[in-house]
Amino acid sequence: MYQVDFNKPCKVFFIGIGGISMSGLAEILLMRGFSVCGSDMKESDIVGILREKGAKVAIGQAASNITEDISCVIYTAAIHPDNPEFMQAQALGLPMLTRAELLGQVMKHYRYSIAVSGTHGKTTTTSMLSWILLEAETDPTVSIGGMLDVIGGNIRVGHTDYFVTEACEYTNSYHALSPYISIILNVDADHLDFFKDIHEIEDSFKTFAEKLPKDGLLIVNGDMDCTDYIKKDIVSRAITFGLNEDNNYRAIDITFDEMSHPTYTLSVDGVPAETVTLSVTGIHNVMNSLSAIAAADFLGIDRAATLRGLAKCSSAKRRFEKKGVTADGITVIDDYAHHPTEIAATLTAAKNLNAEKLVVCFQPHTYTRTKALLPEFAEALSLADEVLLADIYAAREKDDGSVSSKDLAEAINAKGGHAVYLGDFASITDYVKNNCKKNYLLITMGAGNIDSIGDLLLKK
């Protein structure tokens, strides 16, 4: 594998530089004096920010963008071998690294690197750790898969040995990372276009855990059936978090305010400790916060700073983000949930808000996920009073005709829920305008571009 010499900045090209994780790495290299260039399929705020910081970005991907003076080309799992820039880089014999391989090399330059993994909750937990490290004045470097107001975007380049990043399991990309602390929030069936089944996913997380050094730490959800399997062969120390009594870090006496913000008593190794108050919603974020506290404790962060950071931590963009209230009095919230477990957690938290009616505008994300988990999606979405369905967001896939949002609507209705297939955003927007009223709670939900519906409604 090509090794980037961070003491000798060179010219690096990013295929798809406008992606949330790719842009973060590009910015880190810019701050280290590298000449950064790249391409993306469209203009965006992220592309604009990168240009302001000195990157040269071409819109559209073409072989002519790849020149012989480039020292290394970075690409993601979304880039196919027939991509013209990928093919040209290979033809010129240029060194190539995946996004995760570059991230792994970057992490080696930080003594205290934290990799936050799990099927759900990575961005929120990384946000929590970012707030904690900032509150403790550690001047961390942060790479997050969302836009976080406290760092002014998706990347913060610090000047110390503290580094926190998300670690994605898709295509086993997180196996290329080099963490000192690894967090496994949960293990669930997802990305079934890559993984064969849940057992293969568990194997993947086990391999990730085994990469820790002897002096490192695995922080793992102790409420999972696969926890013992994941940690049995690791050489590092392991601690568990969760709600069950045998966890090292546990939440007890959990209560929620009228906005579904939790407060609980922290218990460490069976001994009750401080009271923890969160500014994010739901029981799932209690779990996320426990893992963040465990990581902060291992790093020697003062517990008071940890509690202040958690109390201040608001959600990243698109994580139960309140967008506003329409002229008709409809509260609009946007959430990135795109897996049944995430949907159920979000809707359970939303029900604590006591709205007159809970309406969800849902855009399924990828055909393979929708087809593989159709009954689970129907079950989770049935928690809403009404579900308005957009067409499936294809992402990296092509429609083979085997599943559609109409199928999901039928499955929800068969379970006693109320779903309406509308397809396009204009139809959904019109439906909301004509059928929703004051004191309704509307959640736009999905990992695609469904959030634009909320923006349209708030402009009307």
Image (tube, rainbow, N blue to C red):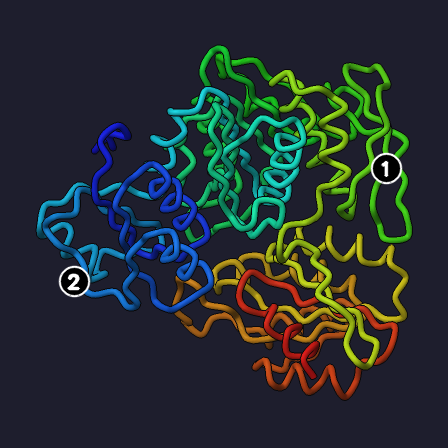
Q: Secondary structure at mark 2?
A: helix
Q: Quadrant of residue 424?
A: bottom right
Can you see residue 1? no
Location of mark 1 (residue): 263
Q: Check whether the beta carbons of the residues at disc 1 and disc 2 lie within 8 A of each other.
A: no
Q: Quadrant of the N terminus?
A: top left
Q: Quick one: label 1, few (<14), some, or many (20+) residues within 10 Å?
A: many
Location of mark 2 (residue): 63
Q: State the separation of the CA atoms marked 1 and 2.
A: 54 Å
Q: What amino acid is labelled 2 in the image?
A: Ala
Task: Out of 3 and 161, give the one closest to the viewer.
Answer: 161
Counting residues from the start of the chain, the first of labels 1 and 2 encountered is 2
Q: Residue at x 40, y 64 (%)?
A: 397
In percent of width and height, residue 22 lies at: 39, 49
Mark seen at residue 22:
none
Q: Residue at x 43, y 53 (%)?
A: 193
